[in-house]
């Protein structure tokens, strides 16, 4: 029963994460780099601190952050910086491939690397056959969805592709999605490195559901640094820093609301990942990362259908997509067997 509760908690966060790009549809006039860093302020600075402050008892969050052991803390930040490259290119992969295909390719590689690498490099953990099989089922579902994306690309005219995704660019998007997937797996490496911080958090009487929240603060500081440097560079290069000052009060507050909403939705995946993993049996907890990624892909493709990114695709393509989604969803439960 705890396993099902854990998966459902992870699914709640996944629903938020796979929906985070939708509020960007309401952003007006701003360049990509302007709205991306604004959602980052919410997702990587404001919301993580708020959730951690609310869940560590007796306002002890800042004691936890200051007392965190140096090595786990700096490793978490370092992996956060590397993950930030993945997060940055992840946004670009969606920009060039759309919500459905972009998230499928990037998150698929994130699931595989993020789940398999930690036990390979940690001598205290073993790389079991069931772990390999579970991730294999996940990757199989991702491959099927990728094939559906290729069929869709083949069946649509250039005009139809541009209508579905305005900046559609398959080759550029796939290369960026591969980089995004590999580097995004560093987030899970950061969570593994930050386990001593979880033990410190536990010593302050924190509910096991929320032990990862202070660790997330360190990882996301690193991620914010990478994204801020790149986005500010683009703001200066493209002179889009004017977006923040010359768009008018109405557009500014409209964009501020929707970018912060996007950031809030994005962060939910990791808050609920921590909650869900605390409910999973010990031998299943290692699958939490791949479960999250598989559900993110499933929900993002549902959003892709709602946003008409698959409009014009033939029946065969839609059936392949449907089979891929079923396999992905099955991969989140097969490990509990």
Image: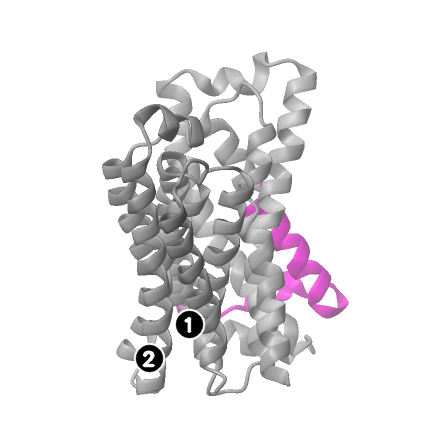
Q: Which residue is mark 2?
A: 133
Task: Give the extent of the magenta segment.
Answer: 42-71
The reply to whether residue 299 is in sight is: yes
As for residue 50 lying within the magenta part, the answer is: yes
Inter-mark Cα distance, 1 to 2? 21 Å
Say left or right for 15 vs 313.
right
Magenta-drawn stretch contains 24: no
* Residue that label 1 marks: 192
Residue drawn at (45%, 60%), measured in percent from left and top?
325
**Relative to 336, does residue 269 appear above or below in the rendering?**
above
Q: Residue at x 35, y 81 (%)?
A: 131
**Does any portion of residue 194 appear in the rendered image?**
no
Question: Dot 1, crowdedness within 10 Å: few (<14), some or many (≥20)?
Answer: some
Give how far across and how far down residue 169 sits, in percent.
29, 32
Residue placed furthest toward the front: 315
State the residue at coordinates (33%, 59%): 144
Which numbered mark, 1 or 2, is in the foreground of this view?
2
Say whether disc 1 or disc 2 marks the residue closer to the N-terminus. Answer: 2
Above or below, 235 against 263 in this view is above
Q: Position of residue 207 (x, y in %)?
A: 69, 76
Residue 162 percent across, percent down from the top left = 38, 26
140 in relation to 318, above or below: below
Q: Which image quarter: residue 184?
A: bottom left
Is residue 192 or residue 259 the one in the foreground? 259
Q: Which mark is residue 271?
A: none
Please state which of residues 259 and 297 is positioned toward the viewer in this rendering: 297
């Amino acid at each position: 029963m705890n396993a099902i509760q854990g998966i459902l908690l992870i699914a709640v966060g996944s629903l938020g994460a796979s929906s985070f790009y939708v509020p960007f549809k309401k952003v007006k006039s701003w360049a990509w780099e302007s709205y991306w860093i604004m959602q980052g302020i919410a997702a990587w600075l404001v919301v993580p601190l708020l959730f951690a402050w609310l869940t560590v008892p007796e306002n002890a969050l800042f004691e936890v952050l200051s007392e965190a052991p140096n090595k786990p803390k700096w490793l978490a930040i370092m992996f956060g910086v590397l993950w930030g490259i993945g997060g940055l290119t992840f946004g670009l992969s969606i920009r060039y491939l759309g919500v459905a295909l972009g998230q499928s390719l990037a998150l698929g590689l994130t699931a595989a690397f993020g789940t398999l690498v930690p036990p390979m490099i940690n001598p205290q953990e073993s790389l079991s056959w069931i772990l390999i099989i579970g991730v294999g089922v996940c990757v199989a579902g991702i491959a099927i969805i990728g094939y559906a994306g290729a069929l869709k690309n083949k069946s649509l005219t250039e005009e139809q592709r541009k209508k579905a995704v305005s900046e559609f660019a398959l080759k550029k998007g796939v290369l960026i999605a591969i980089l995004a997937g590999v580097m995004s797996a560093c987030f899970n490496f950061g969570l593994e490195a930050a386990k001593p911080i979880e033990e410190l958090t536990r010593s302050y009487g924190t509910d096991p559901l929320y032990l990862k929240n202070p660790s997330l603060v360190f990882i996301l500081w690193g991620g914010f640094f990478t994204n801020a440097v790149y986005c500010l560079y683009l703001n200066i290069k493209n002179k889009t820093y004017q977006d923040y000052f010359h768009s008018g009060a109405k557009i500014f507050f409209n964009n501020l609301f929707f970018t912060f909403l996007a950031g809030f939705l994005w962060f939910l995946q990791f808050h609920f990942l921590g909650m869900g993993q605390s409910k999973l049996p010990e031998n299943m907890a290692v699958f939490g990362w791949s479960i999250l990624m598989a559900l993110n892909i499933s929900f993002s493709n549902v959003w892709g259908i709602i946003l008409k990114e698959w409009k014009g695709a033939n029946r065969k393509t839609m059936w392949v997509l449907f089979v891929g989604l079923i396999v992905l969803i099955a991969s989140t439960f097969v490990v509990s067997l």
